[in-house]
Image (cartoon, rainbow, N blue to C red):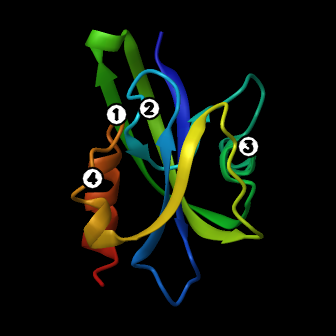
Amino acid sequence: MTKATVAAIIRQDELKPGTILLTRRNVSPFMGHWCLPGGHIDDYETAEAAVTREVLEETGLRFADPVFFHYFDELFPEYGFHAVALAFIGTGEGRETLMPEEVSEIRWFTLGETLALPLAFNHLQILQRYAEQFPV
């Protein structure tokens, strides 16, 4: 059955749409790849609540004023993974805190740098669409 997931495009601030926070996955699938913070929507949880919770769990940041950006299909039969990812844009408030159960590293990147990294899931597609709408 298809799952619903969320992904957060966290900007340093609204004036710097070209600086994005990524995490390096410490779990399979895609262990060691960079990704946007996010994850599965829990039963009876709204998408906005899920993205806010996932950002806090993975980065220690409060995801301020999330705005829905776009949806993306994630089809990976080799991992038995089929999801619809709902991407949100917002800013991160607070101080990054590494959560080593899921994340091995947290870093800010320029948008150009993110597009050259090995990214998990369809996060390259998400960031390419973001770059089209918010050219730096």
User: Residue at image x 38%, y 28%?
Assistant: 30
Tell me where residue 107 appears, x and y as whole percent. Answer: 50, 62
Q: Secondary structure at mark 2?
A: strand
**Quick check: 80 left or right of 39?**
left
Tell me where residue 117 appears, x and y as whole percent. Answer: 27, 53
**Quick check: 45 left or right of 91?**
right
* Dot in front, 4 or 2: 4
Q: Which residue is mark 1?
A: 73
Q: Amino acid at mark 2?
A: Val
* Dot in front, 3 or 4: 4
Residue 84 - label: 2
Query: Quick check: marks 4 and 1 in contact, CB under 8 Å?
Result: no
Q: CA distance from mark 3 to mark 1?
A: 24 Å
Residue with the most extreme left position: 116
Quick one: label 3 or label 4, which is nearer the N terminus? 3
Quick one: label 3 or label 2, which is nearer the N terminus? 3
Tell me where residue 60 appears, x and y as whole percent. Answer: 75, 54
Q: Secondary structure at mark 1?
A: strand
User: Residue at image x 66%, y 37%?
Assistant: 100
